[in-house]
């Protein structure tokens, strides 16, 4: 299912997850104590826990569940070393900075394009 914005853009709805998914994810990570990939988790969780659902459940369980760009997977914060937490924070902040830069470039290009488009009418 998609949502359509006023400008006609289709925004996909986020994957469905339930509190049960979050609970199942936390239990799996608790039992292991280390880093697990989405496929490791999916294999242990059973049906309904797709990679998208795992990402959504991990996001809902933040900060209890740690994952970041380039991480080896998912891990409970209580099992992380201080270095892993610092690396996580740094990676997420860096990704956010890069996304903001990209958004600004796109926004400026859009406004140049829109200004030139309206001048031609």
Image (cartoon, helix red, strand yellow):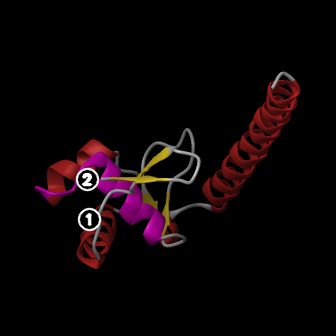
Residue 60 lies, in percent from the top left, at 44, 70
Which residue is pictured at 11% across the width and 55% down the height? Answer: 47
User: How many C-alpha atoms fall within 10 Å of the one at disc 2: few (<14), some, or many (≥20)?
Assistant: many
Question: Is residue 60 found inside the magenta-colored segment of the image?
Answer: yes
Tag 2 and tag 1, C-beta contact below 8 Å: yes
Residue 121's disc is none
Outermost residue to the left: 47
Q: Is residue 100 above or below residue 115?
A: below
* In the foreground, 20 or 26: 20
Asked which secondary structure carries label 1, the reply is helix
What secondary structure characterizes most of the magenta part?
helix
State whether residue 75 is above or below residue 77.
above
Q: Which residue is mark 1?
A: 28
**As displayed, is residue 39 above or below residue 46?**
above
Residue position marked by numbered label 2 in the rendering? 41
Q: Is residue 90 magenta?
A: no
Q: Report, in whole angstroms, how far the alpha carbon at label 2 lies from the one at label 1.
A: 7 Å
Q: Residue at x 75, y 40 (%)?
A: 103
Residue 120 sits in quarter = top right
Tell whether 16 sits left or right of 74: left
Q: Residues within 10 Å of mark 1 (few under 14, many from 20)?
A: some
Q: Nearer the viewer, residue 66 or 106?
A: 106
- Which of marks 1 and 2 precedes in the sequence? 1
Expressed as whole percent of the image width and height from the top left, the position of residue 74 reads 42, 54
Check disc 2 and report its element: helix, strand or loop.
helix
- Residue at 46% across, 42% down: 72
Q: Quadrant of residue 15?
A: bottom left
Left/right placement of residue 28 relative to residue 69 reads left
> Which quarter of the rendering shows the C terminus?
top right
Please tell me whether residue 2 is drawn above or below residue 116 in the rendered image: below
- The stretch in magenta equals 46-61
């Amino acid at each position: 299912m998609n949502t359509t914005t006023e400008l006609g853009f289709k925004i996909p709805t986020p994957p469905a997850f339930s509190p049960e998914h979050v609970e199942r994810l936390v239990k799996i990570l608790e039992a292991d104590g280390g880093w697990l990939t989405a496929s490791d988790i999916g294999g242990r969780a059973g049906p309904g826990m797709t990679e998208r659902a795992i990402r959504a459940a991990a996001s809902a369980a933040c900060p209890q569940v740690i994952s970041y760009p380039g991480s080896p997977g998912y891990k409970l914060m209580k099992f992380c070393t201080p270095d892993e937490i610092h690396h996580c924070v740094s990676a997420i902040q860096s990704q956010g900075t890069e996304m903001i830069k990209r958004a600004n470039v796109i926004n400026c290009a859009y406004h140049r394009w829109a200004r030139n488009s309206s001048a031609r009418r």
